[in-house]
Image (cartoon, rainbow, N blue to C red):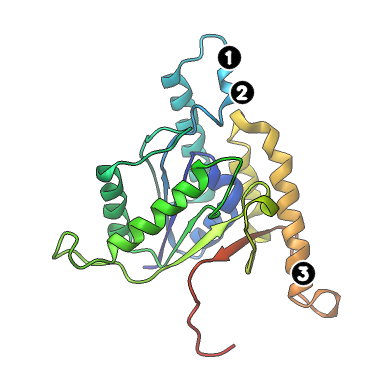
Amino acid sequence: MSTALVISAHSADFVWRCGGAIALHAEKGIDVTIVCLSYGERGESAKLWKNAGATLEGVKAARRKEAEAAAAALGAADIQFFDCGDYPLELDRDAKFRLVDVIRKVQPDFMLSHSMEDPYNTDHPYATRIALECRMIAQAWGHNPGEKVLGAPQLYLFEPHQTEQCAWKPDTILDITPVWKKKKAAIECMEGQQHLWDYYTNVAENRANQFRRNSGGQAGGREAKYAEGFQSIFPRTVDAL
């Protein structure tokens, strides 16, 4: 069975940035596992903190509930929460090895995480550095000898909030029109960040415009209303162009 792994810094990031990819591949029978390294309880939960009597544990619980509902709406096979804290996000050696265990168990055909840079939120590129480090460890025959080592899955970087500030350049545009209703439902699970609902709808519409243009546009390209952009880290090996 084909599998994929999403490594999300905070518990809502996967929704905005690759929810369509999750839903689309889930519909194709690919098991998608989501790992949320933190709940984003400090830095991305302003609306929840404005509620009277808000507590750290209460905010975490609300964020977890939202993320679980979103993952279910997208058809993800599994969602796991590492609860490593945010602002700053930090993983010690044990947490890294825990992620390596997940990677080896899932044996993903491809992985998704954040852009390599993000001056507005350093938790995001930190999560990707962790993803790359743990991918490397999972490939090492000397780490827990006897376990099945990881192959060489592509790591796709999903779109940051402000691309021109994050050195992110998409080389892959995915048509998510068939599953847009699922992504929209997942977006609407994120009640703590309602200000982003329209923003990421607009992003999907803009990427669809680029999908149409690059697939032939008015000269015969396939229609697409919603899309997501990704930047690949590793060379893609092909038999034909």
In the picture, measured across the screen, residue 155 lies left or right of residue 160, that is: left
Q: Earlier in the sequence, mark 3 or mark 1?
A: 1
* Image quarter (top left, top right, bottom left or bottom right) of the N terminus: bottom left
Q: Of circles 3 and 2, which is in front?
A: 2
**Residue 127, how many percent across, how many down?**
45, 48
Which residue in the structure is indicated by mark 3? 212
Q: Amino acid at mark 1?
A: Asn
Q: Amino acid at mark 3?
A: Arg
Quadrant of residue 188 within the rendered picture = top right
Callouts 1 and 2 close, C-beta under 8 Å? yes
**Residue 167, how many percent across, how many down?**
62, 57
C-alpha distance separating marks 3 and 2: 36 Å
**Numbered disc 3: secondary structure:** helix
Which residue in the structure is indicated by mark 2? 47
Extreme residue in the right direction: 218
Can see residue 205? yes
Q: Amino acid at mark 2?
A: Lys
- Check residue 51 in the rendering and tell me which mark sits there, or answer none: 1
In the picture, measured across the screen, residue 100 lies left or right of residue 49, that is: left
Q: Nearer the viewer, residue 76 or 129?
A: 129
How many C-alpha atoms fall within 10 Å of the one at disc 3: few (<14), some, or many (≥20)? many
**Numbered disc 1: secondary structure:** loop
